[in-house]
Amino acid sequence: MPQISFNLSSKVDVSDAENIARYVQVPAMQNGPLYRTMFPLSDTITETQRDEIIRWYADMLEDAFQDRWESFLKARSIDGTPVGFCGWTVIERNREQVEANNGQANEPPKKEKRKKTWIPEVIDIDGWSALSRALRMERDRVLKNLDNICRLTFMAVNPKYQRQGIGSAMMQRICEEIDQHGRYAYVLAAPDGVRLYTKFGFEIVGRVETPQGIITSMLRQQRQS
Ligand SMILES: CC(C)(COP(=O)(O)OP(=O)(O)OC[C@H]1O[C@@H](n2cnc3c(N)ncnc32)[C@H](O)[C@@H]1OP(=O)(O)O)[C@@H](O)C(=O)NCCC(=O)NCCS
C-alpha cells in the first residue's frame, strides 16, 4: 500500500472550509448512518446537488471555526490538499470561571454563530431531525453527571488515504491534549470509527440504532498523562 506523507496542523481558517468539506468530510461520511439518513438518495444525486451539500458542509465548518471552544486538526498531503480532519469541543460546566482563570474573560467574543438560513434541496429534514434528537438524548444521558469533557465533533479521512495511520495520528494528538487536562472524552461513533476509538481507550456505553446502521456511544475515562 502506498504510504502518504502528511503533516498535521491545528490552524484552520474559514478559507479551508470548502476544501475540507469537498476532499475530506463529504467523501468520508458518505457511507455513515448520519449522512445516509440526511441524504437517503445520495446514490442518485446530481453533481449540482452534491456541490450544494458540499457548500452546506463548508458553511457548517466555517461556523464551527468561529467557536472559541472548538479545536481542530487538519492533515494535509505534501501538496497541501487536506486529507484528514477532526474537531472537538470542550464541555466545562463552569465556563466563566475557566475563562477568568485563563485570562480570556475580557477577550471579545468570537463572531456570533450564524443561524443556517438554507438547507440542501435533497436533505431529508424529518429523518435528520429525528436522528439528531435521538443522538442528543443519548449524549445527554451519558454526560449529564460529568464535567471536563472533550467531545469529538468531527473525525474523517478521505477514503483514498484511509488505513495509512492518519486517523490514528490525529487521535494520538487529541488524546495527549485530553490527558494533559485530565478530561473525559466522548464520541458518537459511526461504524467506521469504533475500532479506532477502541484502540485509544474509548468504551462502548450505548448505541443509537438507525435503519442506516448503528451509531455507537463511546466514553473514555479521565486519566492523567
Ligand atoms: C475512522 C477513520 C477516520 C479512520 O481513519 P484512518 O486514517 O483510516 O485510520 P488509521 O489508518 O489510523 O487506522 C485505521 C486502520 O488502518 C490500519 N493501519 C494504519 N496504518 C496502516 C498502514 N500503514 N497499512 C495498513 N493499515 C494501516 C490501522 O491499524 C487500523 O486498523 P484496525 O482498524 O484494524 O486497527 C476513517 O476510516 C474515516 O474517515 N471513516 C469515515 C468517517 C467516519 O466514519 N468517521 C468516524 C466518525 S465518528
Image: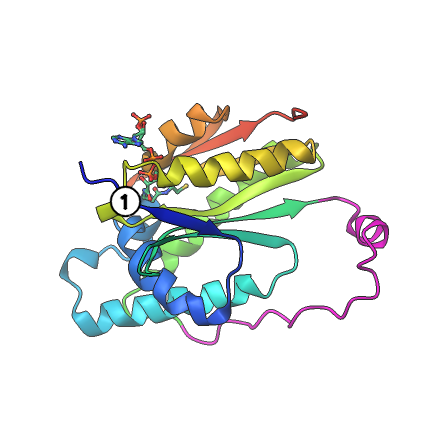
The residue shown at (84%, 66%) is 106
Quick check: can you spot residue 141?
A: no
Dominant SS in magenta: loop
Name the foreground residue: 66 vs 46.
Answer: 66
Quarter that holds the N terminus:
top left
Q: Which residues are magenta?
A: 92-118
- The quarter of the picture where residue 184 lies is top right
Residue 176, x across and y down, in percent: 58, 34
Q: Which residue is mark 1?
A: 4
Residue 56, x across and y down, in percent: 38, 68
Left or right, 143 with reference to 209:
right
Residue 33, x across and y down, in percent: 32, 44
Above-or-below relation of 161 to 27: above
Mark 1, secondary structure of its residue:
loop
The residue shown at (45%, 72%) is 15
Left or right, 180 with reference to 1:
right
Q: Please tell me whether residue 97 belongs to the stretch shown in magenta.
A: yes
Label 1 environment density (alpha carbons within 10 Å; few <14, some 14–19, many ≥20): some
Q: What's under tag 1, amino acid-wise? A: Ile
Residue 210, x across and y down, in percent: 34, 40
Q: Please tell me whether residue 199 belongs to the stretch shown in magenta.
A: no
- The quarter of the picture where residue 164 lies is top left
Quick check: can you spot residue 101?
A: yes
Ligand 1 sits in quadrant: top left
Quarter that holds the C terminus:
top right
The residue shown at (17%, 65%) is 45
Above-or-below relation of 11 to 192: below
Left or right, 1 with reference to 148:
left
The residue shown at (80%, 46%) is 94
Q: Residue furthest left?
A: 44
Name the foreground residue: 150 vs 16.
Answer: 16
